[in-house]
Amino acid sequence: MNSSSQSPQGLRFGIFEIDLDARELRKNGLRVKLQDQPFKILAAMVRRAGEVIPREELYAELSSHSTYDSKHGLNNAIQKIREVLGDSPENARFIETVPGRGYRFLPQVEVVYKSLVSGDNRAPAATEANKTVTARTGTREHWRIWLGAAALVMVAFLVSFYVVWNSGHSGRKAMLVVVPFVNISGDPGQEYIADGMTEEMITQLSRLNPKRLGVIARTTSMQYKGTHKDAAQIGRELKANYFLEGSVRRDGSVIRVTAQLIQTSDQTHIWAESFDGDFGEVLKMQSAIARAIASETQIVLSKQVQEWLDAAPRVNAEAHMAYLQGLQAITLRTKESIEAAITDFKQSIAIDPNYAPAYAGLARAYNLAPVFGVFTSAESFPQAAAAATHALVLDDTLADAHNALAFTKAHWEFDWAGAEREFRKSIDLEPSSTWNRFTYSNSYLTPLGRHEEAIAEIKKAIELEPLFVPYQSFLGRTYALARRDDEALAQLKRSGEQNPNVAVNHVRLAHLYAHLRRYPDAIAEETQARVLSREDIETAREHGLALTKAFQSDGARGYWQKELEFAREKPNPPEAYVTPYGRAIIYSELGDKENAIEELEKAYAERDLYMIELANTEEFDFIRQEPRFQSLLQRTGLAK
């Protein structure tokens, strides 16, 4: 029997066969129409089943046709193959996209010899001549076939083992960055629409499949606004596999949105599309973009996510625009911007009283109001809780509303079980939200002394916001509250190197240096913080000189006495000792138990934002065993 009579002619996977000689695909023995280029790609993948085949190698399969755009054509070829196989990106049974790498053909493949490739899948009857050959060689061929099959099984097992092991150890999580959408309306006053589109797309995409697709958070992505860096450079800087860019043009009630997805490794344009319609359909457009990206990156969508995308509602255009203005304002993080955000969200609600996102935005703005001095905690938190609760009545899938409610439960009610429930719900709904993870760390895990978990959550936020220094700085503060002073100092210094112009980082360094009894360093950092907080330079220097003289004349006591004077003055940098809680720290450093506890009682009555740190603030070790202090721990639910 010569070798050609048993040479492979086809490859079988399930009910499909590829006839390599006839260049045909068959299903249950019947020919399936498949164009030449998709057939070449399919054959190439089937030959290497189980392997991840780089896109570049598949491009080469198409490059023999000089008129064929292989990079763009590969996507079309894959789509046509999926159509004839009945496959889908969401539930891949045949072709899996490995983000940032290529494609993998999933089914087990069997080699089909010439005698088995026929319409009815039966071997032709043996002639007398070949019966004689079979009698002489049957046993040898039998063992050759079985050994070959065994080898194929072993290879398949090893490949499968490697794939499973590698998927568990490499993470295989793709990262995507949404660069700021461009406002092409010609009206700078509509910039908030493009910025809002950017933020909403980040939110949409972050919910698709967080285990497979991470989305760089807004604050980091917005730093690329107007930079004109290409996809490859941004990909390298953020370690992102994909790059989504787009533009927005609004003309009256009509909006046009364009978007394109680029693979950063080779700047391949994977997908692009334009959407035109009434502004009220903008959420449906965003859902369509999200679905397309899930398809192109082979992200499997759960039934719940698919239903959520399908349910994207039509919105009241005017209410949504007011809401987007509120989103833009709240990100600026100033007293004036928080006031503006509250006004915008209220306007959105006035236009459409059933628009749930506006209530969630209002709740978040009220929660931030005490931080920036817009309202006291007592004035603000009840309104935040009411707005968040109403948002959830309208739509209980809003992560922002669950987060806002959790914040008030922690800082206002000291309801730690309720806070945990709402924080976890917000993270489950939107795992890529850095705000959700940051507040869960700062307002729940750290207060309860779960420091390792708190640090891990902050690090997850930093992974998605690598260029956002406030989170880098807060990691330093989290270390300090965990009493890991060396790590706190190193982290705060790193944050300062990343951006030396963040005032609050200098304040935190000043506080840490003072705690470490390095008062000259503390004075230098506080002076820098005052300058960066737009305090008059000469006034800031005078404060620094006054602290220096007080320290030189009366040591640590002189330093803290002067800080107590400054705490009653204005202006002061962020996180200065100006609240009752801050003054309690000063009195503890001065050894004044009575005044320290009196200030803490005020802080409790006012729901001072920092009361949740009561169990972790090391300066209070001086009064920790006092009955009134223990009573405060009980009332805040922080007693161990």
Image: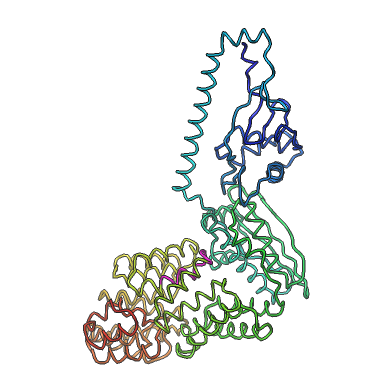
Identify the residue shown where x is 54% and y is 76%: 401
- Number of numbered tags placed on the structure image: 0
Decide if residue 314 is in sight here.
yes
Q: Is residue 432 magenta?
A: yes
Closer to us: 144 or 561: 144
Tell whether 365 sits left or right of 184: left
Identify the residue shown where x is 74% and y is 63%: 275
Quadrant for the N terminus, please. top right
Decide if residue 71 is in sight here.
no
Residue 31, position in %: x, y?
75, 33
Closer to us: 219 or 36: 36
Identify the residue shown where x is 34% and y is 85%: 582
Residue 91, position in %: x, y?
61, 50
Q: Quadrant of residue 624?
A: bottom left
Residue 542, position in %: x, y?
37, 86
Q: Does residue 467 lie above or below 113 as drawn? A: below
Q: Does residue 284 lie above or below 108 as drawn? A: below
Quadrant for the C terminus, please. bottom left
Identify the residue shown where x is 61% and y is 14%: 3
Q: How would you classify the magenta stretch by its main secondary structure?
A: helix
Closer to us: 602 or 636: 636
Q: Is residue 599 magenta?
A: no
Residue 311, position in %: x, y?
66, 67
**By what rule are the colours in the image chosen?**
rainbow
Q: Quadrant of residue 497?
A: bottom left
Q: Which residues are magenta?
A: 429-441
Tell whether 593 sits left or right of 116: left
Q: Does residue 454 lie above or below 374 as drawn? A: above
Q: Quadrant of residue 307?
A: bottom right
